[in-house]
Amino acid sequence: MDRRGFIKKSAMGMTTAAVSSLLEHPAMASVRKTINHNPRKDMKKIMVIDGGPRRNMNTAQMLRKVAEGVKSVNPDMEVKTIRLYDLDYKGCMSCMVCKLKDKASNVCKFKDALTPVLEEIAEADGLVLGSPIYFGDVTARMRAFLERLAFPWLSYNDYSMTAPKRMPVVLVETMNGKPMMNNSNGYGSMENCISSALGKPRHVKAYNTYQVKNYDRFELAAFSEPAKRKWREEHWEEDLQKAFDAGREMAEGR
């Protein structure tokens, strides 16, 4: 590097350092907020898929926080939540209509209550999936949904995975296990399909969650309710914040 190049590079480094230092000043809080909360202009709609059976327990609360995070960046962005347990549908029926020659489709063509949801996802700008973990896996409802979502993406000509459009994805898991002791396989092999077709997903996990509100009513002697309560008091708000941040950063394009 010659002398002129060295001076130019040094000056650029000094400028960057000066700007960074300036932005850290408390008086620049509003500027930082503007820089860090710049919504993606191309994002209009986020689809949130709730694969849990209970309307107001852990998974549902986490997904609401994701939606709040999106709205904190852009109140006008549409965030639509679908509860899979409210719908009457099946997993992949192996009808192979999505693989018909000259009529192949990357959206499932089997007609039931899930059809309009899959069509909306194909046009959406972001996807959030949430499920409690049962026996180490997502719920049967979520698995059936994922079959219908992903099988049409798969080409049996070259095994490529092609969705109607790529988009950011957040995967939410809530579980009874702890970070260092759990049997969760998460979204399993379906996560590979999501990564290939939509893009690498972001994970948000909540561990050691409350299973019921009143432990005295149930045969759950293997669990210490005081210990569960202590964990929740120490971690639950942090878990909700992680969900909120995931939604906010999705809307910001980060």
Image: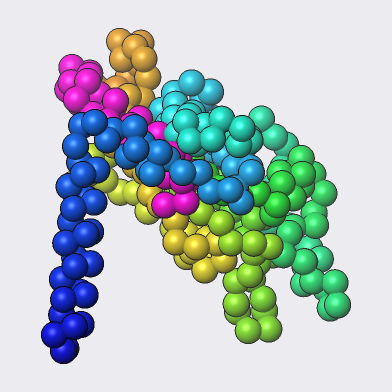
Residue 93 is covered by the magenta coloring:
no
Residue at 41 percent of width and 28 percent of height: 58
In terms of depth relative to the viewer, which is nearer, 25 or 167?
A: 25
Q: Is residue 175 visible?
A: no
For this view, does 139 lie left or right of residue 77? left
Return the x and y of residue 27 as percentages of the image width and height.
24, 31
Identity of the residue furthest to the right in this view: 102
For this view, does 110 lie left or right of residue 254? right
Residue 242 is covered by the magenta coloring:
yes
In terms of depth relative to the viewer, which is nearer, 134 or 67?
A: 67
In terms of depth relative to the viewer, which is nearer, 195 or 16?
A: 16
Residue at 16 percent of width and 89 percent of height: 2
Residue at 63 percent of width and 84 percent of height: 158
Return the x and y of residue 135 as percentages of the image width and height.
39, 44
Q: Is residue 70 visible?
A: yes
Image: 7 above or below 213: below
**Residue numbers of the magenta segment:** 225-254
For this view, does 214 lie left or right of residue 168? left
Q: How is the image coloured?
A: rainbow
In terms of depth relative to the viewer, which is nearer, 224 or 130?
A: 130
Image: 160 above or below 251: below
For this view, does 114 lie left or right of residue 235? right
Residue at 74 percent of width and 57 percent of height: 108
Image: 199 above or below 22: below
Q: Quadrant of residue 1?
A: bottom left
Return the x and y of residue 31 as percentages of the image width and height.
34, 38
Majority secondary structure of magenta residues:
helix
